[in-house]
């Protein structure tokens, strides 16, 4: 079991990765300062406190934010009724 070490996140790297289309949640993991190799990577995982979207199955804080779609996240509502998200990779 590797030692768990808290790593500060480099905000400039998060901004660059996000601007390039990386999911902000993943950008924070990738931007952990001092991470020399994947051998050093250890991630503490905890259950999400957010509800699960019935369409995309992601646990997101904005599930139910749109009254007409109480079981969907904002991203899914946008994909169903609005212009949808801008896809960077497919
Ligand atoms: Zn969703």
Image: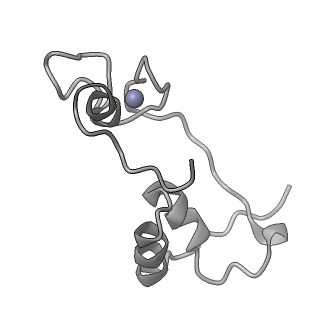
Q: Is residue 9 left or right of residue 41?
A: left
Residue 75 percent across, percent down from the top left: 33, 37
Residue 37 percent across, percent down from the top left: 79, 76
Q: Is residue 76 left or right of residue 20?
A: left
Name the residue at 82% across, 61% down: 2
Name the residue at 33% across, 32% down: 79
Q: Nearer the viewer, residue 10 or 77?
A: 77
Q: Residue 49 sits in which quadrant?
A: top left
Q: Nearer the viewer, residue 36 or 84?
A: 84
Q: Is residue 85 left or right of residue 31?
A: left
Ligand 1 quarter of the rendering: top left
**Is 51 drawn above or below residue 11 in the view shown?**
above
Q: Residue 7 sits in which quadrant?
A: bottom right
Q: Nearer the viewer, residue 86 or 12?
A: 86
**Is 17 drawn above or below residue 46 in the view shown?**
below
Number of numbered labels in the structure image? 0
Image quadrant containing the N terminus: bottom right
Q: Is residue 23 left or right of residue 37?
A: left
Name the residue at 19% across, 29% down: 65
Q: Residue furthest left?
A: 67
Name the residue at 17% across, 25% down: 66
Q: Residue 18 sits in which quadrant?
A: bottom left
Q: How is the image coloured?
A: one colour
Residue 84 percent across, percent down from the top left: 32, 39
Residue 12 percent across, percent down from the top left: 42, 83
């Amino acid at each position: 079991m590797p030692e768990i070490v808290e790593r500060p996140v480099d905000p400039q790297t998060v901004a660059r990765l996000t601007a390039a289309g990386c999911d902000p949640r993943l950008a924070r993991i990738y931007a952990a300062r001092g991470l020399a190799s994947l051998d050093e990577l250890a991630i503490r995982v905890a259950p999400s406190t957010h509800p699960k979207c019935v369409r995309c199955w992601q646990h997101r804080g904005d599930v139910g934010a749109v009254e007409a779609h109480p079981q969907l996240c904002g991203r899914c509502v946008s994909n169903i009724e609005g212009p949808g998200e801008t896809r960077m990779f497919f």
